[in-house]
Image (spheres, helix red, strand yellow):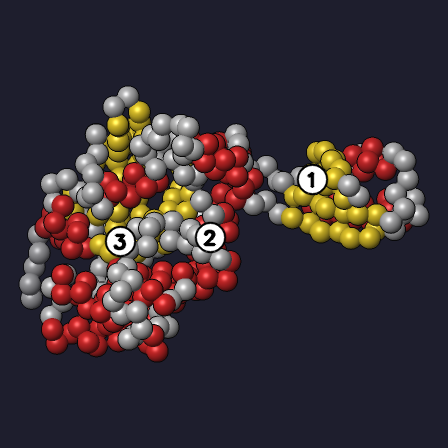
Amino acid sequence: MLHIAPNLQSAIINLQFQRQTMNSIEVNDIVKKFGDFTAVNGVSFAVEDGEIFGLLGPNGAGKSTLIRMLTTLMPPTSGTATVNGHDIVKEADGVRRSIGVIPQAMTSDLELSVNENLLIFAKLYGVPRDRRKKLIASLLEAVELTQWADKQVKNLSGGMRRRVEIARGLVHEPRIFFLDEPTTGLDPVSRVAVWEMLQKIKQHRDLTILITTHYMDEADKLCDRIAIVDHGKLVALDSPLTLKASIPGKNVLEASFANAPVGWEAALSTLPFVDGVTTQGNVFRISSSNGPGTTLALMEAASNANVTVHSLSVQSTTLDDVFVHYTGRALRDALQDASAMDSPFMLRRPGR
């Protein structure tokens, strides 16, 4: 019987635990400066094996700069990061072999067929000849483009082109997949199709995904955890559900009434749990810390006053509410600020 010294046994157990709990990505106090401008300011986070991790924030928040550092396209000014256990500066080749990257801009060759686009990348990544055909066929099936394999990419819709690029980014079977604003510019139907495609691929592959987005619904739908980034800083990090639960109860009741009397807005403001009431046309927006409680009181008050409730809906806390809570402004306002910075009359700053 083999006997192992207690100290050696403890070391083996610790090593096994570290392997089981190893993070795919670890970022420690990373900073990126462009002259006097700090695009990323002391950001730290870890992405667990197998999760879909989202960086949420407006254009100009530093998300793309983070992606460029993590994919070895630019070095950090200070701080460290590892991807699949490889240091992004000291072991850049190891990082590159471990990752697939889908940039924000479409980069597939329009004149080549779908199959040819994937084949070129398979060759560039050194995928063995005997694996290429089977692997490409499998990827095309996964992104539902098998029947389009021999069609030129220029004949595809924007959503289908994005699916080509997702398949191309997986052709060398990476462990970690980076997607930078993958659905920007797509119509709503194509966006949902891309979401479903990513979830389907994730279910069948040993893959960790890091995605940047400024779409609240995209982050809420796709991500296991979200890091909110604003002005180069990480201001909040957790699951979408936990983030929404982290701010004071914010239910919004939207109601319209057929025969609301004078002073009805003031009456609504006295209902239990109500924080405030605003009106827009015939619609009353009631902010409440307890949506169900206010709803019951509203229906009772309307009945007592012989007021007919024409419509009523209750909205729970959204990621937009979370963004406002942690940054002091709505994401749509932040996007407008970023758009202003991108106007031809403004000097473009790095960090996008």
Residue situated furthest top in the rendering: 36
Residue at 62% x, 40% y is 249
Provide the secondary structure element on which disc 3 rests.
strand
Q: Depth check: 281 or 276 in front?
A: 281
Q: How many marks?
A: 3
Side of 167 where 9 appears, left or right: left
Residue situated furthest left in the rendering: 2
The residue pinned by badge 2 equals 218
Q: Disc 3 and disc 2: Cα gap in Å?
A: 18 Å
Side of 83 where 305 appears, left or right: right
Residue 307 shows which numbered tag? none
**Of callouts 3 and 1, the N-terminal one:** 3
Q: Depth check: 128 or 243 in front?
A: 128
**Of callouts 1 and 2, the N-terminal one:** 2
Quarter of the image with the N terminus in it? bottom left
**Camera-side mark, 3 or 1:** 3
Is residue 228 visible in the rendered image? The answer is: no
Q: Disc 3 and disc 1: Cα gap in Å?
A: 43 Å
The residue pinned by badge 3 equals 101
**Of callouts 3 and 2, the N-terminal one:** 3
The residue pinned by badge 1 equals 288
On screen, residue 81 above or below 164: above
Is residue 133 visible in the rendered image? The answer is: yes
Q: Depth check: 279 or 292 in front?
A: 279
Residue at 32% x, 34% y is 351
Quarter of the image with the C terminus in it? top left
* Number of other residues with Cα within 10 Å of mark 1, as a class: few under 14, some 14 to 19, many 20 or more: many
Residue at 45% x, 64% y is 193
Amino acid tagged 1: Ser
